[in-house]
Image (tube, rainbow, N blue to C red):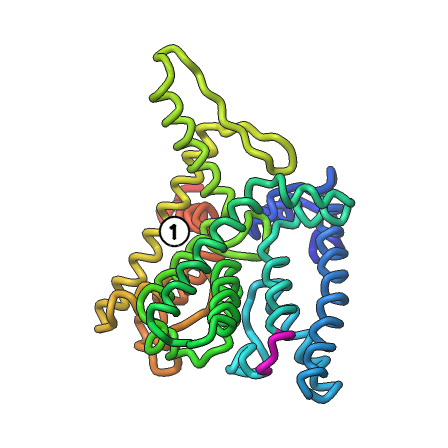
Amino acid sequence: MFISVFAAGAGAVGMYAGEAREDRILPNLRRTANFIWRVSLGYLAMGTAALWAALVAADMPAWKGLFHAVMLFIAGFDTGGFTPTSASVGLYHSWAVELVASVTMVAGALSFALHYQLWSGRPRELLRNVETRLLTATLLGTFSLVALGLVQSGTYHSAVVVLRRGLFHALSAHTGTGFNTLPVPLFATDWGALAPGALVIAMALGGMAGSTSGGIKSIRLALVGKHMRRELRLMLLPPDAYAIETYHSNGSQVVRPAAVRSALMILLLFLLLDLLGALAGLYYGYSFDLAMFESTSAANNVGLSVGIAGPGAEAPLTLVYTLQMWIGRLEFVAVLALVGFVVSSLRGRP
């Protein structure tokens, strides 16, 4: 909003980059910010209309349904997860609401650069982009594990229910939204071990870079994977051979060592942040699986819970989760820059 209304000075550029919107979709930064406004408002109109229709069909009064539709869309597209009641999407008991909410979650996990390609009439970009390909693969993989875990635990006796519950929560976890249709404790008491474990993996992976989602992000996983493939190829080639790996993201890109090092560093820092939060949960007597679930949800800005984070949580543990949410949202470069600035200021250095 600031960039759209005022001139884009250095401070505005820094704020824009800090929110993971580094891609300049249009040549001018201000025009890029304006496009984000237009596409968000366009989706708001369409998403609210679809959710409103689904809510009214679920017997909710029209004006109350409109309010809930607006709130649900904003929470879904911004992958924030807050809903008008603590029952989340489970309040409505409607497969239609869950379906539309799923679409908004996926839209929020896609980058604004990709949205620009789609709005410009280039739908093939969905199939060519390395992040959408990887996001689809990891989503199908984590959902398969969730479904397998639900079948193994015998939680549900209908394939339709397994599909509905499993896919919705896998989407919610992977996109970093945090919508749920179940009472919070059921993840720990009724879902066994494999299904919640798959949700932990999905929460850690996150959506696309340049989206509203949190997590490690698909582009970092793609870069590390491409680099590993390059190294394996070099092992099989003659000593003097040279291999180049490319990927498609807003055009053909070359995998560069500096980008791989940066991606790998952020990936490892996210895993370390998840582990440190889990250790804090272990200190307060929670089992490792529950502590890891809660920590990963906090660090990757998801919001799904097994009941540890709540009104009765220990104050130091709540502080740990709060710091995890803050660090995970800003990501590590901004946090490290802030820490460096504070340390330098305390030492009296500019």
Q: Amino acid at mark 1?
A: Phe
Residue 227, image x, y percentages = 42, 31
Dot 1: element: helix
Q: Which residue is mark 1?
A: 270
In the displayed image of the protein, which residue is found farthest to the front?
Answer: 158
Q: Is residue 4 left or right of residue 209?
A: right
What quarter of the picture does the C terminus occupy? Answer: top left
Residue 145 visible at all:
yes
Hey, which quadrant is residue 108 in on the image? Answer: bottom right
State whether residue 10 is above or below residue 329: above
> Residue 82: within the magenta?
no
Q: Is residue 211 left or right of residue 143?
A: right
Label 1: how many Cα within 10 Å (few below 14, some 14–19, many 20+): many
Residue 24, image x, y percentages = 67, 41
Please state the extent of the stretch shown in magenta in the rendering: 92-97
In the displayed image of the protein, which residue is found farthest to the top?
Answer: 240
Residue visible at 41% across and 67% down in the picture? 322
Residue 309 visible at all:
no
Residue visible at 62% across and 69% down in the picture? 99
State whether residue 13 is above or below residue 246: below
